[in-house]
Image (cartoon, grey):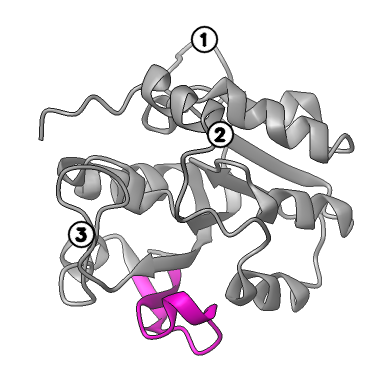
Amino acid sequence: MSLLLDANYWNERYLKNDFGWDLGTISPPLKEYFDQIKNKNLSILIPGAGNSYEAEYLVNNGFANVYVCDLAEEALSNLKKRCPAIKLENLLHGDFFELNSNKHSKPIVFDLIIEQTFFCAINPSLRSTYFKQMHKLLKPGGKLVGLLFDAVLNTDQPPFGGSKAEYPHYFEQLFDAQHFEKAYNSIKPREGRELFINLIKK
């Protein structure tokens, strides 16, 4: 694939509001998951967060350590406008794959990382690297939780599709799957096309 999915590409899409898969609100499966979390001091990362309605929901419901990472400055700016309570130092403008690569700064590790339309937005050649980086960024026993598409989508631009059969190849050496099944509470257009994952770092 020759398309360069860099900061300029994503900033342009945010500026044009060019997101057919943006729900405009928190995803129901993630809302239900968040609502059962008792410890609101967990360190939580949402990478490739986009407009990040999930981060907004968490912060507005008292979660104290919510971090968002995105290549596009415009996406982080949108979130700051909607959710002024989020800590500015927790808005990480940069490449998810380069987090903790600076030897001169203290590494950030997380209890929980949320997947919401980030995996489908990266170049498919990075899928194995994605899970390796998730593993590095999680504390021992930390969790990667969220949604993956189980559907054929685009092959030349995001969002890219995938399948339930494909994903374990990437993560089974790194994570135990506490849950890896079709989501039962997806929004109508995504019914039967989303997998809810709850993967625990080995």
User: What type is the residue that disc 1 sits on?
Assistant: His
- Residue at (24, 68) in percent of width and height: 172
Q: Which residue is mark 3?
A: 170
Q: Position of residue 86 (x, y in %)?
A: 82, 37
Is residue 186 or residue 108 the one in the foreground? 186
Identify the mark at residue 104; answer none if there is no mark.
1
Q: Please, what is the three-letter code of the amino acid marked with disc 3?
A: Tyr
Residue 50 among those drawn in magenta = no
Q: Which residue is mark 2?
A: 69
Mark toward the start of the polypeptide (2 vs 3)? 2
Where 36 sits versus 16, above or below? below
Q: Secondary structure at mark 3?
A: helix
Please, what is the three-letter code of the amino acid marked with disc 2? Cys
Q: Earlier in the sequence, mark 3 or mark 1?
A: 1
The range drawn in magenta is 176-199
Residue drawn at x 34%, y 65% as measured from the top left: 175
- Height in image: 85 above or below 116? above
C-alpha separation, residue under disc 2 versus residue under disc 3: 22 Å
